[in-house]
Amino acid sequence: MTEEKLQYIEEAGIAFELFGMTRMAGRILGYLIICDKESVSFNEIMEALKASKGSISGTTKQLIHVGFIEPVSLPGDRKTYYRISNMQVGSILQERIKLYEKFSEVLEKGRRLRLKEDRVASWTLEVASFYMWLGKEVDQVIKKWEREKEEVIKTYTENNESRKK
């Protein structure tokens, strides 16, 4: 693997940490993005990233759960392979909306159980309200994305091509 690809994998790991996920999750996703194969085995990931079996196992489960990667089987092969998911961006965000709503419900329940109107209750109310609101806003963004994605992708591609020159 080239030095540039190894560096990209590490950059992906650091970027994922900014999203609150593990560095290993970003490294695995980064590897799958730059890998020339459609799908790779567990052992290939482990060897490429020089990581432990436990680390790769737990992280691939996490990435499957959030919809970034998916396990696949190949005919005549008992190994499990992994590839970038076919899940649409909107579907990934829809799953996030459910988490926002659940988080909001938990905060609201805690606020009610507090039985005291103070700074903590105010903070909890604001955060619970924000996540409920955010879920509704993200839903609208997904719908807008579906309407406009071809044009957005075209513009993005054109802008990136002009930057390379």
Image (cartoon, rainbow, N blue to C red):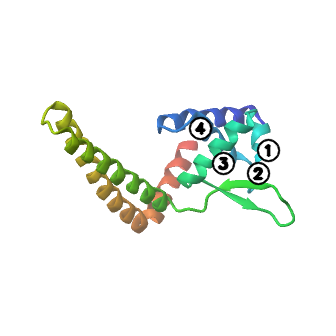
State which tag comes first along the sequence, 3 or 4.
4
Q: Secondary structure at mark 4?
A: helix
Which element carries disc 3, helix, strand or loop? helix
- 10 Å neighbourhood of mark 4: few (<14), some, or many (≥20)? many
Q: Position of residue 91 (x, y in %)?
A: 48, 62
Q: Position of residue 10 (x, y in %)?
A: 63, 32
Question: What type is the residue that disc 4 sits on?
Answer: Ala
Residue 69 lies left or right of residue 92; in this view the side is: right
Q: CA distance from mark 2 to mark 4?
A: 18 Å
Q: Quadrant of the N terminus?
A: top right
The amino acid type, in three-letter code, at marker 2 is Val
Residue shown at 38% from the left, 56% from the top? 97
Residue of label 3: 33
Which residue matches tag 1?
A: 44
Discs 3, 4 touching: Cβ within 8 Å? yes
Residue at position x 22%, y 42% from top? Answer: 113
Can you identify the residue that label 2 sits on? 40
